[in-house]
Image (cartoon, rainbow, N blue to C red):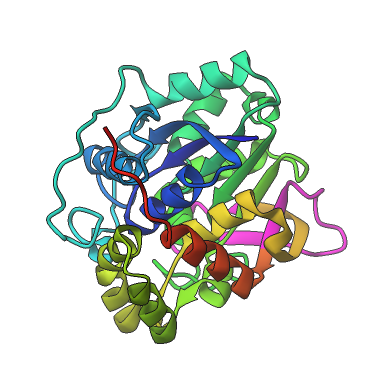
Amino acid sequence: MLELLVDTDTGSDDAVALLLAALDDRVELTAVTTVAGNVPLPRATRNALLALELAGAGSVPVYQGCDRPVLRPLHTAQVVHGDDGMGDLGLADPLGSARPGHAVDVLLERARERPGELTLVTLGPLTNIAAALLRDRALLTRFRHVYCMIGAPDAVGNVSATAEFNAWADPEAAQIVAAAATPELVTWIGWDVSRQDAVMSPADQDRLRGLGTPLAEFTQGINRKVAEWSAAVTGLDGYDLPDPVAMAVVLRPELVAEAERAHVRVALGDEARGQTMTDRRLDAPPANLTLVRRVRERGFKDLLFDTLAKTLEPQP
């Protein structure tokens, strides 16, 4: 059984990633922590609760974390995901609410209580993880592995010319995590993977609609704003799913088609803010991260469609 702790700034693609984890029979989702990023913290928390309840996992505890980056003001991606982060569909409020306690304390406590057992998956800016690292420099070593959806090691950005949103939103936090990482412990899955291997083409969207399940309708609906933004900004042939493809790597490591170990820093200066600087020189410092560079697209989409085709029993 793969035991996951997921940290998320729940926008529309994060919600789909949570569905993948919550609906996998081989996974125990032990807790979800939320952070400001795609949307302000209260909306990120609301959206996490909504996704979990839709998946029949409303009992998974959700804890709120940091409501702003380590040093910078909060800049959200609501222009991408909608004001509510879920395509502005007017979804009803979740039945549940966040548990008492701060996400940073939960990360520290869970990792210390069960060293080497939990896998940490981050889907948003790394603010909570960085804050926890400042209190426990050995934090990353206490997890079985840490997977982060972050970065653009090919320097093709989505929020700027060269930066991916999660790294750009809190570059100081990303650099704190990178500086504490080793390639044996920490894997980053960047936007380059999503842009190449996780684009929902018009044919994919037709297939999704054809499933006719509540999960499929939810996924297509909450990503409608992302589809509009992608057509106007990134020019992709459909909307892409960075957090779900990162979660797929966690759930099915055999989907990784290409990876490398490299020394990575995150740019902090204004001009290149958030750029993932990958040093591939022969005299580069030792590698600190494993970077996933390509994923088997067909395998990812099969996992996605198989999950969204499920029909769930009504919850009591």
Report if residue 281 lies within the magenta region: yes
Examine the residues drawn in magenta and state their main secondary structure.
Answer: loop
Residue sitting at 42 percent across and 50 percent down? 19
Q: Position of residue 73 (x, y in %)?
A: 29, 44
Q: Position of residue 18 (x, y in %)?
A: 43, 47
Q: Quadrant of residue 133?
A: top right
Q: How many marks?
A: 0
Q: Position of residue 129 (x, y in %)?
A: 51, 33
Q: Nearer the viewer, residue 113 or 282?
A: 113
Q: Quadrant of residue 61?
A: top left
Q: Residue furthest right?
A: 282
Q: Nearer the viewer, residue 310 or 154?
A: 310
Quarter of the C terminus within the rendering = top left
Q: Is residue 176 left or right of residue 284?
A: left
Specify the segment rendered in magenta: 265-292
Quarter of the N terminus within the rendering = top right
Q: Is residue 274 visible?
A: no
Residue sitting at 37 percent across and 40 percent down? 69
Residue sitting at 32 percent across and 53 percent down? 11
Q: Is residue 225 visible?
A: yes
Q: Nearer the viewer, residue 238 or 277?
A: 238
Residue sitting at 42 percent across and 85 percent down? 203
Report if residue 37 lies within the magenta region: no
Q: Position of residue 228 (x, y in %)?
A: 27, 77
**Above or below 117: residue 189:** below
Q: Quadrant of residue 26?
A: top right
